[in-house]
Image (spheres, rainbow, N blue to C red):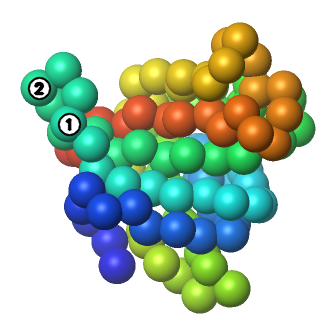
């Protein structure tokens, strides 16, 4: 499956984020879905807490694409995207596994 995800969440247990020539791999409870926010369509990628360096690398990425997996099977492949925002639940830091980070990514690649 590729393209823009619909409003129904697609769940996975691993995601590979391609950032330039680097690959950032996140594992755990992960989901992606299409959302309408401020009148625009976005792909929202919800990730568990990970190594703080991975978060810094992801935040600095600017442009990337991701592939969502479940039990080793590909569930969703995004087009090339531009990172717009990373929101954190709770106190603003991704400090526990219960505080997922939301990556709001535009539906259209640039």
Query: Residue 39: which numbered mark, if any?
Result: 2
Tell me where residue 44 appears, x and y as whole percent. 41, 43
| Displayed quadrant of residue 94 | top right
- 40 w.r.t. 77: above or below: above
What quarter of the picture does the N terminus occupy? bottom left
Farthest top residue in view: 91
Q: Is residue 50 visible?
A: yes
- In the picture, measured across the screen, residue 66 lies left or right of residue 47, that is left
What quarter of the picture does the C terminus occupy? top left
- 81 w.r.t. 93: above or below: below
Tell me where residue 28 appears, x and y as whole percent. 75, 60
Q: Is residue 79 visible?
A: no
Residue lying at 74% horizontally and 55% vertically, measured from the top left: 26
Tell me where residue 93 appears, x and y as whole percent. 75, 18
Query: What residue did someone put label 1 on?
Result: 36
Residue lying at 43% horizontally and 67% vertically, measured from the top left: 10
Residue lying at 20% horizontally and 36% vertically, measured from the top left: 36
- In the picture, measured across the screen, residue 45 lies left or right of residue 79, that is right
| Mark 2: secondary structure | loop
How many numbered dots are placed on residues in this image?
2
Tell me where residue 3 appears, x and y as whole percent. 26, 64
């Amino acid at each position: 499956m590729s393209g823009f995800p619909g409003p129904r969440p697609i769940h996975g247990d691993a995601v590979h984020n391609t950032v330039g020539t680097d690959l950032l791999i996140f594992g755990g409870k992960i989901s992606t879905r299409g959302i309408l926010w401020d009148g625009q369509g976005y792909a929202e990628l919800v990730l568990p807490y990970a190594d703080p360096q991975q978060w810094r690398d992801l935040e600095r990425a600017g442009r990337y694409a991701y592939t969502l997996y479940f039990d080793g099977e590909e569930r969703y492949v995004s087009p090339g995207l531009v990172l717009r925002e990373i929101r954190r639940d709770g106190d603003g830091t991704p400090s526990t596994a219960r505080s997922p980070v939301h990556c709001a990514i535009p539906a259209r690649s640039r």
